[in-house]
Structures are given as structure tokens and as C-alpha cells.
Amino acid sequence: MTGNMHRCAICQTNRAQVIRPKNGQKICKNCFLEVFELEVHTTIVENNIFPNRGERVAIGASGGKDSTVLAATLKALNERYDYGVEFVLLSIDEGIHGYRDDSLETVKRNAGQYGMDLCIVGYDALYGWTMDKVVEKVGRKGNCTYCGVFRRQALDRGAKRLNISHILTGHNADDIAETVLMNLLRGDLPRLGRCAEIMTASLTSPMRRSKPLKYAYEKEIVLYAHYRELDYFSTECVYSPEAFRGNARSLLKELEKIRPSSVLDIVRSGEQLVHDMISPGKLDCGGPNDQCEEGRGLVGSQTLSNKSTNSELLPGAVLEASHEVAHQTTDGSRTQTIGVCGKCGYMSSQPTCKACVLVDSLNKTEPPVEVLLSGDRDFY
Amino acid sequence: MEFEITMADIAKLPKTAAQNLCKRCKLNPPEITMRHEALCRDCFQIYIRTKFTRHMEPYRVKKHSKTTKKLLLATSLGVSSTVLLDTLHWHRALQVERARRSEYDVYVVHIDETAVTGDITSTTNPSNNNTTTTADQCLEKLKEKYTQFEFVKFPLEEIYTISESTSTIEDIISTTSGLSIDQTSTSTSTSTSTSLIKLRTLLSSLNSRASQIDLINILRTRLIIEIAKQRDCEAIFFADSMTKMAAMVLAEVTKGRGHALPWLISDGPTPYGPAKIVRPFRELSKSEIISYTTFTSLWPYSIISKETATSPQRPPVKAKNQTIDEIMLKFFDDVSNAHLSTNVVKTAAKLEFADDRDRIERLGLCEICGLPMDEDPRVRKLKNVVRVDNGGGAGGNLSDADARIYCLEPPEGEEGLKERRCYGCRRSTLGAGKINWPVNNR
């Protein structure tokens, strides 16, 4: 080998240290950090993620690698390119001992490191149940359904409390590719049509949700966190069974081995599957899939059964209405009627919102537990 | 009391009896459990044939039809292909028996790819000269068994000559009709060898075996379609099982061809030409077809041995050299995943893009795969949401970002590639430079 072996393909001066999975380019550490940030910036600009200057935006922060990298890059990019937005960290305390309590410590440190405000919303305070107690009651199977439904609402409530209407999540390209495969495997057509969307808004949530790391490989996120020496928490959720997603995940890993661009190619395919018949924002099946902040730990069969029980709960007229929504045209002349949950006052297409239905089912055989949902009502 | 019969006894009686007999005919002992039903081989055969016949509606004997329809059956000589051949033969024979004539003729086409894939056939028969390959032996056997059908073998490299002129194909057919299998004796052997060089150059310019097999698959389909065009075939029959189709769907999604899914898997007209695509086994699983092969003793008529088809372990391919298609087939071969194939195929079949109708006119066809072009997701979304007609100004910026985000920069001097080649084909030909592509869209 001569002296100029493996020079960085971009700057041509430094030694190449990184092989980019997207295109096999060998580049140096500095160019990698720059390219990574530039790609996130491009994603933000091209998708007009921050349309209004002066807006306060929440970053869903779990303390894990994805959300930590998201907060770090956004802070840097906001300073460099002057988006003119203010970021707030929003964390959910699911009440999982040995997992969330530790990761929340990380988030608290992050808040100091990035100079961002932090708001923590707890399941305990909102629903009267921690995930530890839920698991004690329902067992390990199916607990992710509860966690997902609760988290979606908790994030919304937290943001509302902060007077914020836009939440950023740390979903990366691998998460989205997995979800595309998963939705195909379990035949979930409506979700297939929107799982690759970068920005989602739905009728049952007043929030916009965006995924600025949508095109970032998990591998590169880990590498970025490593090079920037970011402070993150790397333990998996202690309850996560990952049965179905794990299946899609191992398939994706195998594909990535033979063609590293596969992850991105699946994301691209997923984007093409966004079809008008069920356009995002018009129909909300509100499954726990979108709600899982990290997007993992969901068992397919449970979602399905969960959905069916819910449609049984729907009065016939509502069912018909939602059926109509599915076939409406893009001009959006017809809209789904959204009411509020009779119990907690949260937005819902049904008389009782899904979270309350789940809380009720938990409380049923339990000696009456005081559900502290009323305290939230003034927010809506 | 010995005469007393309880309700429990009554409930027990027919059940125990039925357990030992086929659930449908209740005459023969069951030999296979299919979708929670124990069936005898006769009833299983009826089941398979019923599924098949459902797709044969347009080819039923009609009173006033004057011409005989021509159907092209594409065969890989694999298990499903052979079962489809056998089933078509049964269907046609039934027509002849009942109506004294048949509504259709079958033209069986096998595409020989061994020159570029270097398959087992050359290793089992090391001496190439004057030795017939296993594929040839298999074709001979099929010709003897199914005398009503016409069999032709085309080497894959024929794609370089077939689309040039119609006379070429007529030459090939006239010279091969007598001894269609022995292609070395054809007058086109010299042009074949130059075509083979062209094909090998094309494939060697690609960066992985995954890309090579992807383009070989495309070339095979396009050659079959060209042959169907030249022979005025009304429909092309593929023996794809549901399992195979599920693997196809996931493989194409993985290659970035999500936009083309409806065309890739649906039966009926194609953007390529007048011939319709029919996949009569799209509701049958691979394992059902394998069982059928055993029951009807069709194993000798396929180049896949029973051992290879039924053993879970595939011959080891170097992990890095696997193709996307192989990984997906393996995934659905796994018993624990087999049931998911129904979901995949049915979901993909339901996909319907509202902007499909004018997509071909708006964007044209991909020069490689011949399917409608895709569109930058952001341009497409913009159009759907805001309904902007002039994406012109923003389009320039977007294409730049597209290259940056997806890392699919066009090679030097090929700047317009994005308008001519779809995402998946750009990915498979990435870094190949200027390529000599044999087929044009018409």
C-alpha cells in the first residue's frame, strides 16, 4: 500500500475512517459529521419542517441514541442555519423501573448540555397506572399496546401543556424500513400508506409530528453519537418482546448485509406507497404503532385484536362515517367528525378515547383507583 | 343399559369416523392436511384444479369463437412450472374431450440463462460439447409427455437480437421448430455469440450479484414478452405461487420499486404490450404445489429434485453473494413465516395509486424495466396536497437534494438519467456507467 491509501473521498486529505452504508463512500470523521448534519438539514429544508420562525417545537426525548442525536444535531443546525425555532425536550415517564428512571437521568443531563427546557409527563399522574403496574396486571404479552396508546396521548398532553403544536421524534431510516416491511407482512394497508411519511397530522391529535432523522441510518446515528461523544442511555426497554418487529428487523439486517442501500430503498418504496385513497391526516386508526416513540416493541396480533374490539365499540353511524373517510378524495370536502372523549375530554372519534377504554379495562377488576384525568381537562 | 345412547355418544360417532376419512368426499383416507382440513389426494387435486380453473374463464370453449387463442406458458422447469404445464394439459384435454376442440393452443417457452448464471447444469455435465444439459433432458421428457404443446428454448442473450427485427425471430422459429432444443445448430449461432458477449459485458459492469440477478430477471421477463408479441400470443402464463409472489413483493420493495408494485404483481394488461399476464397459481402456496407434485408423480418432469424442494436447507451460497430475491424466498420458505405470504400478496394487490391513470403519459416508462416511472416523493406529495402544476422552479432544487439524500448521483455525462430510469433500476445499475441495453419500450 502506498502512502495515499484510503484517503477521504470528500476532502481527499484525511484518512478515511467511515464507510457510508448509503453509497459505500469511504470518508473521514470530520466529513462524516458534516455530511450527516447536512443531510438532516436538507431533510428539514426540503420538507419545510419548520415553516414558522419563533415557533417552539418539542423533541420527544427518551435519552436513547436517536433522540439524543436528534437534539444535538438540531441544536447545532438551528444555530448554523438559523431556523429561528426554540426546542424543548419532552419526555414520557412510563414508570418502568430500571429502564426509564435511569434514562430520564440522561435526559435531564441532556437538557443542561443543550440548554433546552425539559418537561416530563408521567403515566402515573395521567392514568393512575405505571407500566410496571400494567405489566403486573396484564402480563408481558400485550403490554406494548397499553404503552403505545398511553404514550401517544401523553406526548400530546405534554406538548399542549407547553403550548406547543409540533413534536419531533427520533425515528430513523431503519425504524421506518422495518415498519414498511412489518405493515406489508401483517397486511395493514392504511398504515402502509402513511408509515413512511415524514410529517403526520391526524384528526384525533392536534399535533404535527415530524421525523427529521427519517433518512439517517441507525449505524450512522450510533457513529455520530460516538464521534460527538454524546451522553446517551443504551438499554432496551425491559418489557420489549419485539416478536413481530424483531422478525422484520432480522430480515432487514440480512438485506443490509448484501446491499447496504436496502434500508434507504425500502424507505423510498414506502414513500411511493403513500396513495390518495387513504391520505394521511384524513383517517386515523390510531394504532399504537405510530405512538411508540421509538416505534418498536409492538406485537402485530395484539394490534389487530385491539383494533377489532374498538370497532365493535363504535356505533354503526360512526363506523359508516369512518368508512366514507377512507374513500374520500384529496380535496378534503368531507371530514370525519371528531368529538371529545366523554371521560377525559381528550380528542376522540369515539365516545370514549382509547386510553380511557384501556384504563377502564385495567380498573375493572381492581379496587377503585382514583384516575387523575380530570386535572387535565382545563387544557382542552 | 346397553341400549342407552347418550348425546355424547352421538356427538362422538361421526367425528371419530370422519377423522379417518377425507373431510370432503368422506370416502378415502386423508393424505394431506390443508388449511385445517384433512383431504384425500383426489379431493386435494380437485381443490388445486378449482383454484386454477377460476383463472381460465376467458379461455373456456365459446360457441362462436373462430380462432384458436395462443397462450404462452413461461417455464423455468421448476416444480410450479411443471405443475402448471400439467394442469393446463388436463384443462385443454378436457375441452377437446367435451367440445371436440380446444379454445387455445399452448406455446411453452423456456429461457436458458445458464450461459450467464453458470448453473448446476454445467457442473453436472462437465463436457459441454454434444452433451445435453439437465434442462434439455427435462424438456425432452416434457415433449414426450405433453404432445399437444409446442416447446421452445431461447437463450437469454436472444434479447439482443429479437427486438431488432421480426425476421430474426421467424428464422429462429423455423430453424428450431424441428429440433428446437439444439440451439447450436441454428443459423443464428454467430449472432448468438456476439449477443452473449454483449450480455456478459452488461452484467459484469454491475456492482453485485444482487444487481445482476435483478437485471437478469428483468431481461427474462422482457424476452418472454417480446416472444409473446412476435408469436401473437394473447396471454402469458406464469406459474408463480402465492409464496413466490410474496417474496417478489418484498424483494421489489427492497429494491426501491414500491411505485411499480401494482404492475409487478397484478394479472391483466401490462405497460409492455398487448399480451395479458395470468398467474393461475396465485392463490396456492408453494407447499401445496409440492404436495401436488408428489401426488401426481410429476417430480421426474422438473429440474428441481424432490430432495432440494422439500429440504429446508438450501445449497449454501456465500452470505454476501446472496441476492435480495433469494433472501426473500428463504424468508417465506421458513414455516413460521409461510402464513404471512397471504397478507403480503393481498395487501400489495389492494394498492391502488390514484395518480396511476395518467402516470404513464406524464412520466413515461423506465428504459430498463419498462414499467412506469416513479416520481420524487416530495414532488408527488406537493402535487397531491397543494395541487401545484408548475413544479418547475422547485424541481431543480429537489433533484439535487434527491441525489444527496438517496445518494443516487447520476454518473458523469448521464445527467438526465432520473427522467429515464426508475429508482430501482438506477440503484441496480449504479456505477455501471453507460450500458448497452437491448430492449426498447414501444
Image (cartoon, rainbow, N blue to C red):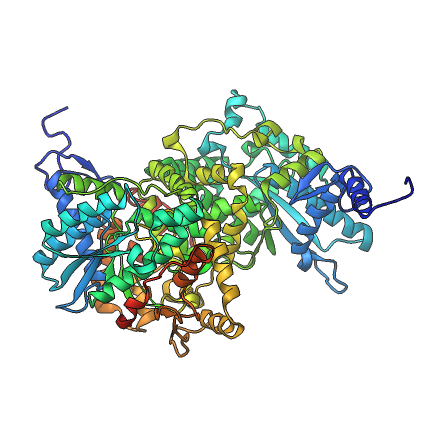
B72 relative to A366 in the view: left or right? right
Residue B163 appears in the figure: no
Quarter of the figure with the C terminus of chain A: bottom left
A245 relative to B102 in the view: left or right? left
Q: Residue at x 30, y 70 (%)?
A: A377
Q: Position of residue B75 (x, y in %)?
A: 59, 41
Q: Nearer the viewer, residue A290 or B109?
A: A290
A379 relative to B140 in the view: left or right? left
A226 relative to B164 in the view: left or right? left
Q: Nearer the viewer, residue B250 or B29?
A: B29
Residue lying at the far bottom in this picture: please name it: A333
Residue B193 appears in the figure: yes
Q: Position of residue A341 (x, y in %)?
A: 39, 70
Residue lying at the far right in this picture: please name it: B3
Q: Position of residue B9 (x, y in %)?
A: 82, 43
Quarter of the figure with the N terminus of chain A: top left
Q: Position of residue B28 (x, y in %)?
A: 80, 39
- Whether residue A247 is situated above or below residue A285 in the rendered picture: above
Q: Nearer the viewer, residue A264 or B174?
A: A264
Q: Residue at x 47, y 63 (%)?
A: B352
Q: Nearer the viewer, residue A254 or A287?
A: A287
- Whether residue B280 is situated above or below residue A358 in the rendered picture: above
